[in-house]
Image: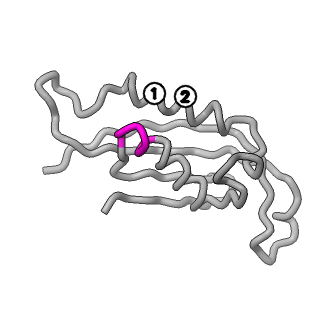
Amino acid sequence: MKHLISKSFTFEAAHSLKITKNKANENIHGHSFYVTISFEGKINKNGIIYDFLEINKLIRIAKKKLDHKYLNDIHGLENPTLENIGSWIWNIFSKKQYTPFELEVSRKSCFESFKIRAD
């Protein structure tokens, strides 16, 4: 049996993409991004997998770097595709010993999402 906990958050940001045939994407434009991050683990003696307070601290770090920013200016997000944004957020958690089981980032207005899952 797998035990999972999840936490969701949103951020607003602008970007431009030069990798598609859609020339409109080359213009600076913004999105509302939705992120759901899940963690797998064993329920400990206190009845939890991870402390949500610790997860919330890492979410605040990510949001401070992403929310209302131009993503192309952020180191590691010079090409801010959904795939790169998801991987970038994943690394914030992994570097702090909170490797996610799964992370999904989406732009609901575009009906697009990217999901990454641990091996």
Amino acid type indicated by mark 2? Arg
Q: What secondary structure is marked by label 2?
A: helix
Where does the image place residue 43, in percent across and percent down from the top left?
Answer: 16, 34
Residue numbers of the magenta segment: 93-98
**Tag 1 residue:** 56
Q: Determine contact: label 2, label 1, CB under 8 Å.
A: yes
Depth check, front residue: 23 or 109: 23
Which of the 4 quarters of the picture holds residue 65? Answer: top right
Q: Is residue 15 magenta?
A: no
The crowding category of the residue bearing disc 2, from other C-alpha atoms within 10 Å (few below 14, some 14 to 19, many at least 20), is: few
Q: Seen in the image, is 24 located left or right of residue 85?
A: right
Is the residue 118 above or below the residue 43 in the image? below
Residue sitting at the far bottom: 21
Q: Residue at x 60, y 61 (%)?
A: 112
Q: CA distance from mark 2 to mark 1?
A: 6 Å
Q: Seen in the image, is 23 located left or right of residue 68?
A: right
**Tag 2 residue:** 60
